[in-house]
Image (spheres, rainbow, N blue to C red):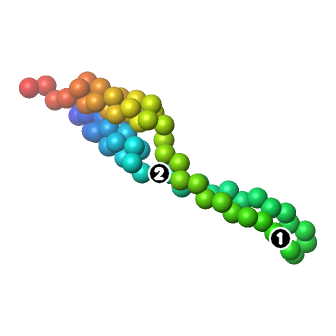
């Protein structure tokens, strides 16, 4: 049960971090002919959906409650 508690803490922390830390994504579009290439690279900073973050937070709390040490 102790492992479930610690896994819940990890999921909870990841859920909270997903609310504030954006995920960086790059996209390259263009053409290449022989040794010449022309294109443009764009960068996006996307955040995880708040619904997914909330599910991770609630799941982490649930795992912590289910795996808490019995006193």
> Residue 38, relative to residue 46: is it above or below?
below
Residue underneath mark 2: 22
Left or right of 69, for residue 66: right
Question: What secondary structure is marked by label 1?
Answer: strand
Quadrant in which residue 19 is drawn: top left
Residue 4 visible somewhere in the drawing: no
- Asked if the residues shown at circle 1 and circle 2 are in contact, with their CB atoms under 8 angstroms apart, the answer is no
Most foreground residue, 14 or 30: 30
Residue underneath mark 1: 37
Does label 1 or label 2 sit earlier along the sequence? Answer: 2
Question: What secondary structure is marked by label 2?
Answer: loop
Q: Residue 59 appears at what percent x and percent y?
A: 35, 29
Give the quadrant of the C terminus: top left
Q: Residue 70 appears at what percent x and percent y?
A: 13, 25
Q: Residue 44 appears at what percent x and percent y?
A: 58, 54
Left or right of 15, for residue 61: left
Give the distance between the C-alpha atoms of the residues marked 1 and 2, in whole angstroms.
Answer: 30 Å
Quadrant in which residue 64 is drawn: top left
Q: Residue 63 appears at what percent x and percent y?
A: 30, 28
Q: How busy is the neighbourhood of tag 2: few (under 14 within 10 Å), some, or many (20 plus)?
A: few
């Amino acid at each position: 049960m102790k492992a479930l508690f610690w896994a819940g803490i990890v999921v909870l922390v990841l859920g909270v971090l997903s609310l504030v830390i954006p995920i960086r994504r790059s996209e390259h579009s263009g053409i290449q002919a022989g040794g010449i290439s022309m294109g443009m690279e764009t960068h996006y900073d996307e955040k995880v959906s708040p619904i997914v973050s909330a599910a991770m937070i609630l799941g982490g709390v649930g795992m912590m409650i289910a795996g808490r040490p019995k006193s």
